[in-house]
Image (cartoon, rainbow, N blue to C red):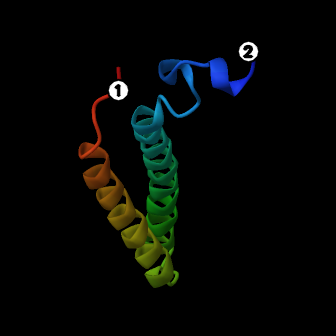
Amino acid sequence: MTGDASRSPATGPGSRGRARTGEDFDIIIGFLGFWAVVLLVVTVWMEVTAQPALGWGLGLLATLLAIYGMVRLRRKLPPRR
């Protein structure tokens, strides 16, 4: 019989569930890291040019806290193969 019934459990779509989740965390951490660098540059520029930088600084803080939380969650997952 062809179709989903003939697939073995090792080759099914859910076989890489936890490893895939770890890769997704890595992607999200990289995305947040990119925006943290952008917000750092903008915040420093706003401070140097004597413009209000509180909002940019708070955005940077929120991004760094999100990265910290994602890294802590990522450590609980098994390592990639």
Residue at 50%, 72% in the rendered image: 46
Residue type, mark 1 in image: Arg
* Badge 2 vs badge 1, beta-carbon distance below 8 Å: no
Q: Is residue 56 above or below residue 65?
A: below
Q: Nearer the viewer, mark 2 or mark 1?
A: 2
Give SS at disc 2.
loop
Q: Which residue matches tag 2?
A: 1
**Residue 7 located left or right of residue 24:** right
Residue 56 coordinates in the image, percent (x, y): 49, 74
Residue at 47%, 73% in the rendered image: 59
Q: Which corner quadrant of the image does residue 21 belong to?
A: top left
Residue type, mark 2 in image: Met
Q: Which corner quadrant of the image does residue 18 belong to?
A: top left
Give SS at disc 1.
loop
Of the two numbered discs 2 and 1 on the same chain, state the one appearing first in sequence: 2
| The furthest residue to the front | 1
Estimate the spatial distance between the alpha carbons at disc 2 and disc 1, rounded to whole Å.
34 Å
| The furthest residue to the right | 2
Residue 23 coordinates in the image, percent (x, y): 45, 36
The disc placed on residue 38 is none
Residue at 48%, 29% in the rendered image: 15
Q: Quadrant of the N terminus?
A: top right
Q: Residues within 10 Å of mark 2 (few under 14, many from 20)?
A: few
Between residues 16 and 39, which one lies in front from this camera angle? 16
Residue 47 coordinates in the image, percent (x, y): 44, 73
Residue 73 coordinates in the image, percent (x, y): 30, 53
Q: Is residue 30 above or below residue 20?
A: below
Q: Which residue matches tag 1?
A: 80
